[in-house]
Structure formats: structure tokens, C-alpha cells
Amino acid sequence: MGIIQAIRGTRDLLPEDIVYWQKVESVTRKLLTQAAYQEIRTPIFEGTDLFERGIGENTDVVGKEMYTFLDRGDRSLTLRPEGTAGVVRSYIEHKLHGQGGVQRLWYTGPMFRYERPQAGRQRQFHQIGVELLGSASARADVEVIALANDLLGNLGLKNLTLSLNSVGNGEDRQNYREALVNYLSPYQQELDKDSQERLQRNPLRILDSKDQRTQEIAQNAPQIWQYLGENSRKHFDTVQQLLTELGIAYQLNHCLVRGLDYYSHTAFEIQSSDLGAQATVCGGGRYDGLVSQLGGPETPAVGWAIGMERLILLLQQIQPKPLPELDFYLVSRGEKAESQALILAHKLRKLDFSVELDLSGSAFNKQFKRADRSGAAICLVLGDEEAHKQTVNLKWMGTKEQQAIAQTELLGMVEQLRQQIEAQKNPVI
Ligand code: ATP
Ligand code: MG
């Protein structure tokens, strides 16, 4: 019989990967909690119409990439392709807007898109995202951008570029659209196929085409900045001024767009030059029209999503694989010694130490090798002689210092041991 394998575009996260994931999760939780963001967890599947209305039927995500199916009650359900639509649905459903002021939310979890799998692009992938709902201030845009920047910075990532644009409001885009279509029309035959179709329907999206020739044409297109009304211009200027005051470098890119009506003003991306083709780690922007589009009250909002897989690819490039944080590794051989080791391990765990017990019963040298690989600070050794005298041989793995002590004495010197272990611990990423 053939071996059953994980589905194309999905990946198991093995224990050696998980250390990185847990690191990212703990740095994220700490940073976002400090900034008064609260975690929210919404279901992994939703009604298909939520994404059709919340992302837009003309987008690649909704048009080509969704995992949509009928359940046994003939409802059309979709595995969420991104996090914002579900968070906004929940925000409306639970009237979180009724609490007044702004809501700062964050989430993390798996997302699903039917795409061609390659490095940094999967069918099940994970995002961390934030949504700041209820503020139209440019300070809100800058707050979320600074958080993305700090998160990546706190993880030690380098070679990142923040690209920034404004897509104005609906009226600005209406004016710009005309100029853009006039410019692009003579090039119609040279555009990629998707872009040709978008020329009348949604020309702004042509600007972020991934096709090389289309990109060259887009580079010289009229820039939306010339079409921004006074308020949009002011918002965009303030965002830039505040970023500068915070010392956050950025590049303006007039081709960075989000083509749907409910997007407004700020659009941004953070890219890494260390990721190859899938360079975008973070994408975000302002979506002032989305909450009302989904049936809630008019609510300005801004947010971003970071792709976890891409982030972790970067982290692995700069951080060597950390060893697990383990206090004790217990080696024992012989019936009596083995049962005493089991009891000792149990007592040490109750005293709040982390302990791995070697269960192999194999020769001491084999157990010692495993102790070395375990990353433990201390190896405790029990053989027949120790078992008989109720002692244990304590070996510091760092210095190789050894001492024989009574088991009761070991348990009595926990505070001293704890301090010594802390002083030696391998700094986990
Ligand atoms: P891309 O242009 O790479 O397809 P996108 O514009 O579709 O990205 P968003 O919807 O803005 O991406 O999602 C935010 C982030 O989520 C991306 O910047 C990326 O880091 C990550 N991401 C998106 N799709 C995938 C995927 N299929 N596999 C892994 N990560 C992804
Ligand atoms: Mg995509």
C-alpha cells in the first residue's frame, strides 16, 4: 500500500520548526499586547458570500483561489483565504463598535488559497494580522505600520523595504481612473491577458500586475498622487510626516494599489530582498468602506497581514536552530536505578524544572550521547551503585563538572540549581 502524504501546498510543522513559530508568536503577543491590541479568533470557514462581499468577486482570491464547497446541508462554505473579512463580520455581529472609541484587534491562524505552491507560497499558509477599527486618523495608519515594522525588527530581520502609496477616496479614484484608462488604452494589446480584461472593469488593478511588460507600462502611467483631493492629500502627507518623525524609512510606489471601492488612502507593503520571488512579507492598508459594505455602521479602519511562512524563512536565515530549553536529562540503567530515576524526574517536574527521562535502558554511553543532544543543562546519572546508596551523579553539561550527591540533598538545593541553570542556559533565539 502507498504511503499517505500531506496534500500538495500544505506542510507539517515538525518539532524542529515549531521553535521558530513559538518564538514569532510570543514576540507578537508581547508587542501587540503592549500596544493594547486584543486577540480575536474567528472560525476557519465562513459562508462564501462573506468573502464575495468582503474581498470582492473580481479579485484573484475570490475568483480563482478559494476553497469553496457545499456542506451536507447544501450551504456554500469557504475556507477563509484571509483574516479581515471574518474579523469584520464578528465585529459587526457582536456589535464591538457599540463599545465606543476604537477597537484594536489581532489574530493569527491558517488561511487557504488554491495557488501554485512554491517557496513562500502554499495552499494552507498562516497569517498574523491586526485591524484597528474606528479611527480615520493618519496616526492610526502610522500606528499599525510602526507595529509591523517593530515586529519584524524585534525578530532581528534586516533588508526590509516599506513601500507606501495612497489610493485616495472614491472620488479621487474616479478622476484618476479616466486618466489611467486613457494612458493604458493604446497599450491594450501589450498588456497581459488579465490586465486586458481589467482595462474597463477595474483598471487600477493593472498597476499591480505581476507580468513584466505590464509592469513596465504601468511604471510610466500617470500617478494617482496628482488626482488626490485636498483631504486625501493631507492624509497622505501626514502619514509620511509621522513616519519620518518615527524614523521609519519608506519608499513611495504609485503602482501599489488595492483595487476595490472600500479601500481608501494608505496602502503599504513590506518586502524583503532575502526572499526571492515571493518577496512581500506584509501587506496592509486602510479600508474605510468595508464595515458598511458588510452591513455594519460606517467605520473607518486600517490593518495589515504578515505571512508567517515567509517570515519564518527569513528568521531561519539569520538564526541557527535553537536547542530546546531543558533543565535535566536523566540517564539510568538497572531495574532499581530506572525506577528511582522515574520518581526523581517526577519530583523535579513538581519543583518546576523541565526534565527528560531516558527510557531506552541502553548502554550508558548511548544515553550520554542523547543527553548531549538534548540541550539539557544538567545530566543526572543513576546506576546500580547510586541506586543502592540513594545518591545521584550530577554532571553539568556545559563545564563537565561532576559531583555525587544524595537524592534528598539534590531536591533540597533547588533554588541554588535554578540560579546556576539560568546562568548557563542557551539563549533560545
Ligand atoms: P502575493 O502577492 O504574494 O500573492 P497577496 O497580495 O496575495 O500576496 P495578501 O492577501 O496581502 O497577499 O496577504 C498578506 C501576506 O500573506 C502576503 O504578503 C504574504 O506574506 C502572505 N501570503 C499570501 N498568500 C500566501 C500564500 N499562498 N502562501 C504563503 N503566504 C502567503
Ligand atoms: Mg496572492
Image (tube, helix red, strand yellow):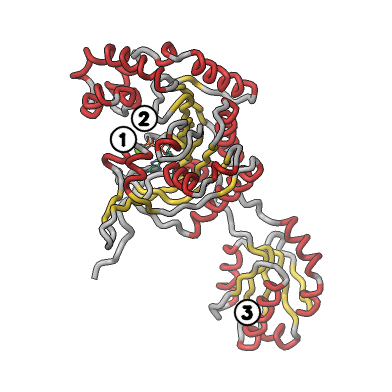
Q: Decide: is 123 above or below 132.
A: below
> In the image, what residue type sits under mark 3?
Ser
Q: Which residue is mark 3?
A: 332
Residue 59 numbered mark, or none: 1
Residue 18 numbered mark, or none: none
Q: Which residue is mark 2?
A: 260
Q: Decide: is 188 above or below 354.
A: above
Q: Secondary structure at mark 3?
A: strand
Circles 1, 2 touching at the beta carbon (< 8 Å): yes
Circles 2, 3 touching at the beta carbon (< 8 Å): no
Position in image of residue 127 (x %, y %):
46, 45
* Earlier-in-chain disc, 1 versus 2: 1
Position in image of residue 283 (x %, y %):
45, 34
Q: Is residue 99 left or right of residue 176?
A: right
Marks 2/3: CA–CA distance: 66 Å
* Earlier-in-chain disc, 2 versus 3: 2
Position in image of residue 350 (x %, y %):
70, 73
Q: Is residue 162 left or right of residue 10?
A: right
The crowding category of the residue bearing disc 3, from other C-alpha atoms within 10 Å (few below 14, some 14 to 19, many at least 20), is many
Tell me if the residue at label 1 has its CB under 8 Å from ligand 1: no
Q: Is residue 408 left or right of residue 165?
A: right
Q: Secondary structure at mark 1?
A: loop
Q: Residue at x 58, y 36 (%)?
A: 147
Q: Secondary structure at mark 2?
A: loop
Tell me if the residue at label 3 has its CB under 8 Å from ligand 1: no
Q: Nearer the viewer, mark 2 or mark 3?
A: 2
Q: Nearer the viewer, residue 286 or 411?
A: 286
Marks 1/3: CA–CA distance: 62 Å
> In the image, what residue type sits under mark 2?
Leu
Q: Which quarter of the rendering shows the N terminus? A: bottom left
